[in-house]
Image: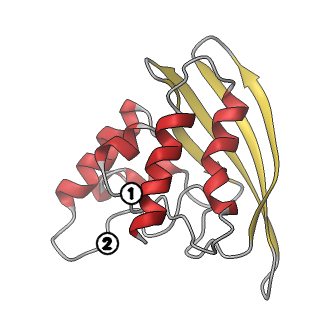
Amino acid sequence: MLYAKSALVLAFTISFGTPDQSAAHFVETLYAPYRNAKGTSTDYSSLQSRNEEQDIYSTGVLRLLDADRAHTPEGYEGALDSDPLCQCQDSEGLRLERVKQVSITDNRAEVSVTLRFVGSHPKIKNLHILLVREVNGWRIDDIQPSRGQNLRQALQPAKSK
């Protein structure tokens, strides 16, 4: 497990540190660890360090994550009780089917993602990932599933839900 986390951190450092890469390439890079041949699964709901989160999420989402942690009692799950990138509890059988850049400006992009889950409960999930360009490149500012709450809604304090 430690090896998998170390490899993930190294992948983040190499892949996400380039501000000029395309928005679609950034998203493809996020899903690359799910294709790990060793069978270990990635889970973006419980990243181990602030550096890992900064390599993925926008400043605005980082503030929401911090607020969620501050309001979550010790020993309890925070708002993210599943992996926001696959909208799942278990990423086993996940295959990245398609990544398509839908729109882009200088500082914002929308990328459409199609995920296929194979195995005993096959299904297809479609997501829209909204990105912002920050100093170190593209970062996730929201994830909108075809059904249910988007990432920012899920991270809002309980009183405003």
The three-letter amino acid code for the residue at tag 1 is Leu
Name the one closer to the observer, 113 or 26: 26
For image coordinates 46% across by 37% down, the residue present is: 13
* Above-or-below relation of 74 to 127: below
Q: Which mark is residue 47?
A: 1
For image coordinates 81% across by 76% down, the residue present is: 118
- Quarter containing the N terminus: bottom left
Q: Which mark is residue 82?
A: none
Drawn side of residue 96 relative to residue 52, left or right: right
The three-letter amino acid code for the residue at tag 2 is Glu
Q: Quadrant of residue 21?
A: top right
Look at the numbered discs 1 and 2 and tell me whether their residues touch, using CB distance below 8 Å.
no
Which residue sits furthest bottom?
120
Q: Quadrant of residue 76?
A: bottom left
**Can the viewer see residue 66?**
yes
Drawn side of residue 119 relative to residue 54, left or right: right
* Above-or-below relation of 155 to 37: above
Q: Which mark is residue 77?
A: 2
Disc 1 from disc 2: Cα separation: 13 Å
Q: Say which element carries label 1.
A: loop
**Can the viewer see residue 56?**
no
Name the one closer to the observer, 115 or 11: 11
Q: Position of residue 113 (x, y in %)?
A: 75, 47
Q: Nearer the viewer's eye, disc 1 or disc 2?
A: 1
Q: How many marks?
A: 2
Q: Position of residue 124 (x, y in %)?
A: 81, 66
Q: Position of residue 44 (x, y in %)?
A: 48, 58
- Quarter containing the C terminus: bottom left
Q: Position of residue 12 (x, y in %)?
A: 50, 42
Sequence order check, earlier mark of 1 and 2: 1
> Badge 1, how many Cα within 10 Å: few under 14, some, many 20+?
some
Name the one closer to the observer, 101 or 48: 48
